[in-house]
Image: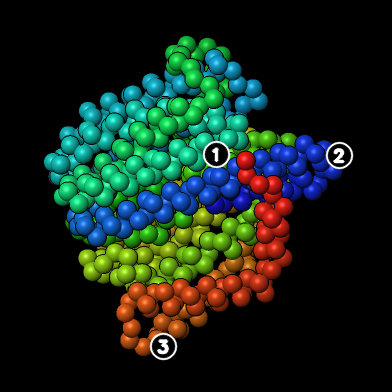
Amino acid sequence: MARLVCTVLLYWDRSTSMPSDAPATTALGTRVVNAVLWRSGSQIVAQMVVWSATFVVIRLLNPGDYGLFAMSQVVLILLSLLNGSGFADALVRAERVGERDVAQVFGILVLLNGGIALAQVLLAPLIADYYDEPIIAQLLRVQALLYLANPFILVPAALLSRAMDFRRQARVNLLSALAGALASVACAVAGFAVWTLVAAPLAMAWTRAIGMTLASPMRVRPSFDLGGAGATIRFGGAMLLSTALWLVQTQSDVIIAARSLDVHSLGLYTTSLFLAQIVTSKFVPPLNEVAFTAYARLQGDRAEAAGAFEKSVRIVMLATMPLFFGLAVTAEPLVATMLGPKWVEIPPIVARLALAMPFVVLQIMFTPATSALGHPRIQVLSAAAGAVIMPVAFVFGVAEGARGLATAWLVAFPLLTVVTASLAMPIIGVGVGALTRAIAPALFCALGMALVVAAANTRLGEMPTPVRLATLIAIGGLVYAGLIMVVARQTVLSIWGLFARRPALP
């Protein structure tokens, strides 16, 4: 969502500040807005499908199943984020791309992902021994099939993104979400236990690989002759390094906890993190390519990018802050309603994690801007800082169990956000005062809403939990809508006007 708004505002500002090129700029802005709507709209629908299946599956499986899956996921995420997506991003950022360039990137991804799959198969027994859970080896061997789909997803997606064609991508993503949802529910009902959590991603990945390949505007064979690919390799290598460091930051909690907590407690923590990270993990990454493409087109116009970044922070915070604050104050009825009695221990964990998420959203907003503006080192340095700050916090927090890990997020991530901001803001051209003014309206409105909802929760009489949850959501929505129309009315009207003036989707 952060990058989505950045994209719209970049071209919105451009269309209003460059009248001499108004027709071309307006047409380009229209393409961006349409692309955003296709990408965000399809993502919302896809996630509704996936979440519907996920909540059904959570009710059927046990916390221990999620604990085992989390152990395998540490390795899977570690290696998956080394899949070379940065090399595909180089195709988006380049001024010109030919068949040879595409074939070289395709070849790099085939070699890289094939090697990752082989490494996971060979390491599986050692990882199972580390966790003292033999089934982990079996899970990892099957999950290695995911990597082999990556080249057939990343290259076509990069070419479609470069062409600002998100309509075909949206259709493929919806189809893959449906395939994953059907696979997960079918396996859970059939009693596949933890294997349910393996089958669904496989169904999604290979459905997406086949669909993206068929939708690609250019089909080439992989080339393993990398002559002349120096710029691509340097950019992709920088992204690969930042990803490796980011992995340490994001996966160190489970690595540390797996040696100290039992699978039940670990399952409680990872499921709490899933709920708290729904916005940041499910909506931001799929929309990344839209913003990256937009920023890449504005590499020489920093003043315009800075103004758009300030506006994007204001809008993104207004959109996401109430979700996090609302989750923090309604965690108990939400968990009881959506997940059932097996998960009664997690509301305090969810609440602490939810309060850390606004910092996560703010931090990741800096990434597409600095990388596409020609400074991938900022992403590397930020990831390096996270690779130190977060593991240290988790080492201290794990002594208090799952709640301690959640507290570590709440303490450490604001510090990491400050570090990232100090590195990125001079590059983007945004000052501390401007950033503070952009965040303040959302913080004021969300805090006011949370206080009203918390007070209402204590005064509501006995009622069924789903009714209580619906009542609190309604109260929060009304209060927040009223506050933002007082505090940020102009911003709301501006965004409404932007989309109202958009020509119809093709």
Callout 3 secondary element: helix
Q: Position of residue 25 (x, y in %)?
A: 76, 39
Q: 457 above or below 487?
A: below
Of residues 308 and 99, the one drawn nearer to the viewer in this rendering? 99
Q: Which mark is residue 459?
A: 3
What amino acid type is highlighted by mark number 2? Ser
Q: Residue at x 61, y 75 (%)?
A: 482
Query: Marks 1 and 3, how far apart in space?
Result: 48 Å
Callout 1 secondary element: helix
Mark 2 or mark 3, earlier in chain? 2
Q: In the image as oriented, which residue stretches furthest toward the right?
A: 20
- Marks 1,3: beta carbons within 8 A: no
Q: Residue at x 39, y 29 (%)?
A: 210
Q: Residues within 10 Å of mark 1 (few under 14, many from 20)?
A: some
Colour option used: rainbow
Q: Residue at x 69, y 49 (%)?
A: 502
In this picture, residue 251 sits left or right of residue 46: left
Query: Marks 2 and 3, how far apart in space?
Result: 60 Å
Whether residue 259 is visible, yes or no, is: no
Q: Which mark is residue 155?
A: none
What amino acid type is highlighted by mark number 1? Arg
Callout 2 secondary element: helix
- Quadrant in the picture for residue 59: bottom left
What amino acid type is highlighted by mark number 3? Arg
Residue placed under numbered mark 1 in the picture:
167
Residue placed under numbered mark 2 in the picture:
20
Query: Marks 1 and 2, how far apart in space?
Result: 30 Å
**Camera-nearest label, 1 or 2:** 1
In this picture, residue 350 sits left or right of residue 28: left
Of residues 489 and 76, the one drawn nearer to the viewer in this rendering? 489
Q: Position of residue 385 (x, y in %)?
A: 48, 47
